[in-house]
Amino acid sequence: MLPIYWTSLDKKGNSNLSEQKAVLSKSLELLSAYDVVVLGDREFCSTKLGNWLAERKVYFCLRQKCDTKILSENEVYQELRDYGLKPGIKLFINDRQVTKKTGFGTFNVACKWKRNYREFKTKDPWYILTTFEDIDTAIISYKKRFSIEEMFRDFKSGGYSLEGSKLGAESLTKLIIVIAIAYTSATLQGRVIKKMGIQKYVVRPETKSKYGRRHSAFYVGQHQYHWLCLGQICEKIVDELLQINRRWVKHYKKGKRAREQAMSMLQASLSPC
């Protein structure tokens, strides 16, 4: 997930429809050569926004609140939470009027409540307003929204402590530009490290549980610089220690080869075209 456009709001709380449309208009213009899917959490639940995107032939998945009303087959409005969704169940509501407001056409709603597994329990189901014609495409697309949350975490507590800067709008925008460049670089480097299969040398090994959170590409890329610098600083000390105990020489050589690969890749990326 890489940032390409943003704006500052002179207020606290959620954005409104006009603010959302202003940012999306510019973003869609920048991405006009691509097929775009707009993913939004419950801040972006407006059917007006959905209608605006549909008019522009843009795919979207916008999470809805549980009290959103749907016109049922018997012409009665029913809240989404009354559809009887339970953990492990999914439902696709096709071509229905959403909310009692008229003039916005009809939408599809993909509903899914993730199955409970041992101690892992999902508190709420997903209700996704979408232009996709099947539930699997809608759910798979919406899942990608969590890389946005991952980026926000990296910008804040996970990497750059953006909120702690306490800067005004203009200075904050300049800082975000610098962070966006650094974030993009670290993320791309991290992806290469993962592809090379040397991630385990760069960061602490991940949990073997398939439900454990994986290290982001940014996390790996950011730690790569520390890992390379530390390797150079401590190389002489490590060599001396290995003379005392040869037991770990084989493992050290593997790590050293991984470091050489990473350094070679980094130097290649920094070379002028």
Image (cartoon, grey):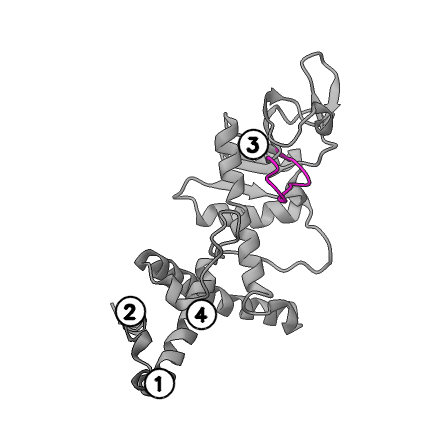
**In 3D space, how far apart are the residues under numbered discs 3 and 1 (Cα atoms)?**
60 Å
Residue bearing the label numbered 1:
241
Query: Which residues are drawn in magenta?
Result: 115-127
Residue bearing the label numbered 3:
130
Pick whichever of labels 2 and 1 is earlier in the sequence.
1
Horizontal and vertical percent position of residue 264:
26, 71
User: Which residue lies at the image location 66% right of the left edge and 42% below the top edge?
Assistant: 42
The type of residue carrying mark 2 is: Lys
The type of residue carrying mark 3 is: Thr
Residue bearing the label numbered 2:
254
**In 3D space, how far apart are the residues under numbered discs 4 and 3 (Cα atoms)?**
38 Å
**In 3D space, how far apart are the residues under numbered discs 4 and 2 (Cα atoms)?**
18 Å
Horizontal and vertical percent position of residue 167:
65, 72
Majority secondary structure in the magenta region = loop
Horizontal and vertical percent position of residue 65:
70, 36
Which one is closest to the eye, mark 3 or mark 2?
2
The type of residue carrying mark 1 is: Leu
Pick whichever of labels 4 and 2 is earlier in the sequence.
4
Residue sitting nearer the eye, 256 or 194: 256
SS at mark 4 in the image: helix
